[in-house]
Image (cartoon, grey):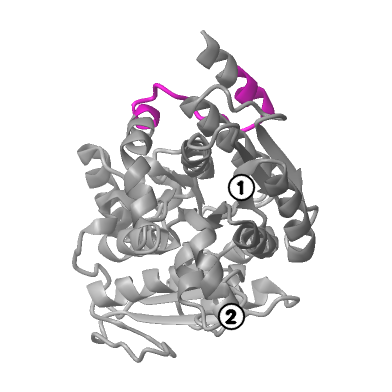
Amino acid sequence: ATSGIVDAATTVSDSSLDGIVALLPELAYRLSGKTPLDSGRRALPVLDTIIPRIGAAFYGSVLGDRAAGDFSRVNDLAFEGLRLVVERYRGSIAGDPSGAAYGTAVTVSYREAAPGSRPEDALRALAREGNGLVFALGFMFAPSAATVAREFPRVRFVLVDGVPPEGESAANLCSVMFKEEEGSFLAGALAALVAGETRGGKVGFMGGMDMPVIREFRSAFMAGAAAVDQAFKPGSTAQDAWVGDFSDPAKAEKLASAMYGGGVRVIFHAAGNSGAGVIRAAAAAGRLVIGVDYDQGLAYAGSADPKERAAAVAVASSMVKRYDEAVLRCSTAWLSAGLLPSGLVELGLADGCVGLARNAWNRALMDRFQPALDALEQRVLRGELAVPRDDATLEAFLKSLRK
């Protein structure tokens, strides 16, 4: 984690005068004890004397007609962040289907990198267009973000939900990651609370590919379930399964059906597009599923597909990552003070950037368990519970509960 403050050496731009000016707001932040990203909820005047330009690169489509389980829907959440930026700073988004325009103080443009294309081409195009701040939205930009950032040292880049490969970095690149383990911990707690209402009820986790980042989701989920009731033990009453692919919903549906048939009441999936199969299995079995990244229950309830709308009742909640808030906070830091941190910034429960989704369709269920969930969240925020991120720390966490 990082304090979110830019190292003084990385704030100095190509001219010494620009460097001195850039350091002044940073010193104010240091003296106030705040970070550039703390200003995300305040509307402050635009610092630049010229019209600032912001660009955003998306992997996949934005605001298109897609299945409710299509994970490019996280792009829509990021786009809402851009809309909040132009509303707050009286600007407009070129090509926004809604046609919303609040003024000319800020201009925003975006590009879609089609699956199979070279994501870095979208980043380079946005930098060449004169954007001073460029967002790379999604982990698919991680391999190339630092390389492109070094090619355009006067442009600030923000990689959201990804980090560059080890050894790759750029002074003008900020990587924003979400504390997924904190949200996954609450997903485990919710699953255990629901399953605990049925005698012998079990909980389950479904991963896309077995890799370290998905292991984080699993470890935190198992810990959250055990924090509610130590009877939920990994490998028995807290089960897991791995699809081996993020785009195989048919296999995920088969695995999930077997888990539900074996007594699992709720499955939390971190399986990308494969998760659509888990949701179908939950609906068919009359069981529940917890989605991931965006509010999948809301997406299914609003789908044009009647089968998807019918499946919405199976989505208990979703572990949401607030792409919109990340975009808004980073844009505000840049527009209001001309600053962004270099390196890694992590946003979690304390920032309101991860958590469990609430909507009109799951309100009754969430209301029933909210007091218990709130109590666990406060324990995490106070540091009383250290949420595990891997198998080793999960084992230590489970041992601590037995003391």
Q: Does 7 sit above or below residue 42? A: above
Q: Is residue 142 magenta?
A: no
What residue sits right under mark 1 in the picture? 267
In the visual, does 52 lie left or right of 270? left
Q: Check disc 2 and give the amino acid type.
A: Arg
Q: Does 313 sit above or below residue 94? A: above
Q: Residue furthest front?
A: 199
Of the pair 14 and 185, the residue shown nearer to us: 185
Q: Which mark is residue 84?
A: none
Q: Which residues are magenta?
A: 379-396
Quarter of image, res 357:
bottom left
Residue at 32% over, 58% down: 333
Of the pair 13 and 164, the residue shown nearer to us: 164
Q: Check disc 1 and give the amino acid type.
A: Ile
Q: Residues within 10 Å of mark 1 (few under 14, many from 20)?
A: many
Mark before the other along the chain sequence, 2 or 1: 2
Look at the numbered discs 2 and 1 and tell me whether their residues touch, using CB distance below 8 Å: no
Q: Does 307 sit above or below residue 348? A: below
What residue sits right under mark 2 in the picture? 66
In this view, the mark in front (2 or 1): 1
**Does residue 147 appear anywhere in the picture?**
no
Q: Is residue 384 magenta?
A: yes
Residue at 48% over, 54% down: 316
Residue at 76% over, 47% down: 242
